Image: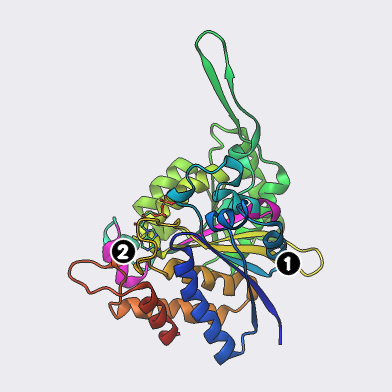
Amino acid sequence: MTSRKLLLLPGDGIGPEAMTEVRKLIDFMNNELQAGFEIEEGVVGGAAYDAHGQAISEEDMAKAMAADAVLFGAVGGPKWDSVPYDVRPEAGLLRLRKDMELFANLRPAICYPALAEASSLKPDVVEGLDILIVRELTGGVYFGEPKEIIDLGNGQKRGIDTQIYDTYEIERIAGVAFELARNRRNKVTSMEKRNVMKSGVLWNEVVTNTHKERYSDVELDHMLADAGGMQLVRWPKQFDVIVTDNLFGDMLSDVAAMLTGSLGMLPSASLGAPDGKTGKRKALYEPVHGSAPDIAGKGMANPIAMIASFAMCLKYSFDMVTEADRLEAAIANVLDRGIRTSDIASGDMTTVSTGQMGDEIVKEF
Ligand code: ATP
Ligand code: MG
């Protein structure tokens, strides 16, 4: 039996509550389907700070580097607002991203039929929506040097950020997008601002070349990122996979998120480069939402974002596509049956707790 090493980092706030529901699925798959998941647990964020004064320990970092995949809950909360900057809860996630070199951030925007009414857009615009935003996560203007505020002396200051992209960075993120598209509807839309940015000119050129050399079977479109944002809201179903840089990806994936309704529904994956020997990618899966301190400990959190993140993990880290599809179908069925946590309930629908939602999804699985 293949061994599948999973590290669970529940974190803070609603992170542990959501992780408990994923744990039910893992136990079910191990017991009923002999899935062979080997589970390790670690501590991250405020919980880690409380335990040993760091946002993640070296020991847990080593576990993350050795795992086939990491499931991450959420970190942070008002309790840790005044801890020193370099050990603040979020530093745990940043360290994981950096050391695991997670350069590709995948954020699907899926609109479950039962929730189309809850979107901020007309139901027919989003019903059946299934798009994937692939955001470059380790380069661009968030990291480029120089990055500083200079005092110009005459009461004026200058804030500087630098957008830098090298060929290899664009090539590898484009490769991820094309490969994902092959298992979807075979279409990639690349977004940049080549009309005003040199890095955009290079982005466009490298994506075009990567397409020509290795992925000409996939349909490729280019769009300026501002026009892309507009199209995303106007008629999102025209897209399949969108590939874009760190900054535009940050904004466009939040826009896409709102197309589908609740934060409590949205999963994400962050992938690294394939290992030279095994071909396996380092990977971390987490819900898009944060620790939601306002509802933590009340059994109100929607566990679907975390569970759907686990579905992505099955698909991308373990090639368990059938099981991932089954899990997504189980989520859809539970929603079709009108089962709702309070964040996705409308009108006078009765609501269930975090634990009941998890139980129902396991039952439908
Ligand atoms: P962060 O800075 O970590 O992103 P945040 O305060 O910006 O955190 P979230 O923690 O993601 O945002 O949540 C914002 C609000 O959305 C929460 O306070 C909560 O009311 C709601 N929310 C988020 N996730 C969920 C969920 N899984 N289930 C129910 N409600 C949620
Ligand atoms: Mg936030």
Residue occupying the point 76% across, 64% down: 275
Left or right side of 339 for 73: right
Neighbor class of circle 2 (other Cα within 10 Å; few <14, some 14-19, many 20+) is: some
Q: Which mark is residue 200?
A: none
Residue 100 is drawn in which quadrant? Answer: bottom right
At mark 2, the secondary structure is helix
Q: x%, y% of residue 272? A: 68, 58
- What is the span of residues highlighted in magenta in the rendered image? 96-119
Query: Residue 238, located in which quarter of the rendered image?
Result: bottom left
x 52%, y 77%: residue:
23
Residue 20 image offset from top left, x and y in percent: 48, 74
Q: Residue furthest left?
A: 348
Q: Residue at x 69, y 59 (%)?
A: 61
Q: Nearer the viewer, residue 216 or 233?
A: 233
Q: Residue 66, which numbered label?
A: 1
| Three-letter code, disc 1 | Ala
Q: CA distance from mark 2 to mark 1?
A: 36 Å
Q: How many numbered discs, if any?
A: 2
Ligand 1 lies under 8 Å from the Cβ of mark 2: yes
Regarding residue 103, the answer to whether it shows in the image is: no
Q: Which residue is mark 2?
A: 343
In front of the other: 323 or 350:
350
Q: Is residue 186 magenta?
A: no
